[in-house]
Amino acid sequence: MSMVSLVGPRPNLLNLDTAGKHIRLELKHPILTNVDLEKIRRIEDNSNRAFRTYTLSICYKASQGAAGMAKALETICKSAERAVRNGSNIIVLSDRALDAEHIAVPSLLAVAATHHHLIRDGLRTDVGLVVETGEARQLHDFCLLAGFGAEAINPYVALDTLSVLRRDGQAEIAETELHKRYIKAIVKGMMKVMSKMGICTFQSYCGAQIFDAVGLSAELLDQYFSGTTSPIGGIGLAEIAEETARRHRLAFGTSPNYRHALDVGGEVAQRIHGERHVWNSDTVSLLQHAVRANDYKEFKAYTKKVGEQDEGLISLRGLLDFDFAAEPIPLDEVEPAASILPRFATGAMSFGSISWEAHTTLAIALNRLGGKSNTGEGGEDRVRYTPLPNGDSMRSAIKQVASGRSASPPNTWSMPMICRSRWRRAPSPAKAASCPATRSMTGSGACAIPCRASG
């Protein structure tokens, strides 16, 4: 795999007169230190003017409030277009100007908007996009920025935070080494994400937009994230702008809670005043007590607690409700449960992704119901083909073979089953079910040949 990123104008490979004459800046990986970014800013004098860097602020006046973000995005896009037409071939989108008087447009929104605006104007291949942002901290932040067109990213707040930790005595290594280790962790994390998608080079990942949006409106996606799909609707630019302005007010306001401290967060780990989680101390303890004591009342208390949380709009399920008919449907017109249950099936979770107990319990439960459990790519132990003394069976009805990656023993094909063949390379046994291209066939051992995948 390669994390090399090339920044600058892309050549037209079909133009025999100009192809091969372009000079591009090669980076070992897309994550820049503060020093690296300054080198790019001043590269014009050291490259015989082959590169011209233009720094474009993505901040706007706080006095405009949330209503000013739409205009700010329009200004950013037009400024980027003007810079390219004036000869700049590297644009640095920066939120460094963020202060009490200025609000920063979310970096992902600014990158995606600029990226697609230049594409529509036919200028995207004439320029490289670099992002200088304090928002990029976690792995997914970097993947999103790269996926929507950023060829290099400078997470200056994350790097400055590490420097402060070292200054306060929480790290005993050199500052440069501390930054190096952080960047190495981010780069290796991005490689893992790319490998799960079957992508080998960062140049293929950059701008590929291999994401589905959840909770964003179609209007927002069409205008700023063109080509990105969403299974559901959601918020638009007005809501994003209001949330951004509210965070700015909290950061630079007079609230005593934030005068000498940051927000507790709570997105990853639960915090008392942070974001609410379905899995919290109450629900986890109730579930543990119910399982360990085999107490059905405790289990009902757990399900009630989870159900009450859904009403707090923690999950999509909390937004749904039953639409009861005005007149009840006669029972003789309702499909019996015995014919519904056989259509139930588990996801393709391999034995390696969950425990033996969980995998076999799912198989037993689905066999009792008349449904179908899935082996996942890892297959299943032949001991599961022997019925248990009480008559239960641990055998999974669905045998999955993903692109010929997993060897299947002969006895796998010697019994009635459903064979599912994945025609795309599955990212991992645990995530095989996420691949969209699936073919299912029903039969006995004869289905081994038609179900073999060619890759």
Image (cartoon, grey):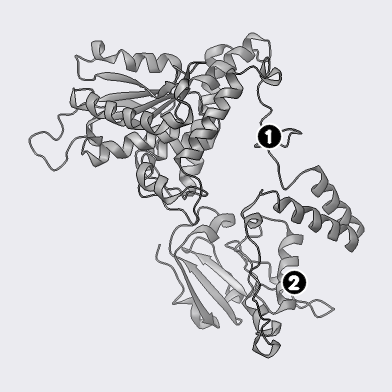
- At which x and y percent is residue 96? 45, 18
- At which x and y percent is residue 119? 26, 40
- Residue under the point 69% across and 80% down: 370
Q: Quarter holding the N terminus?
A: top left
- At which x and y percent is residue 98? 47, 18
Left or right of 96? Residue 261 is right
| Amino acid type at image mark 1 | Gly
Please say if 333 is above or below 393: below
Label located before the other in sequence (1 or 2)? 1
Residue behind mark 2: 365
Q: Is residue 91 visible?
A: yes
Specify the farthest residue to the bottom: 332
Residue 68 sits in quarter: top left
Residue behind mark 1: 266
- At which x and y percent is residue 69? 42, 31
Q: Nearer the viewer, mark 1 or mark 2?
A: 1
- SS for tag 2? helix
Specify the farthest residue to the front: 326
Please say if 12 is above or below 258: below
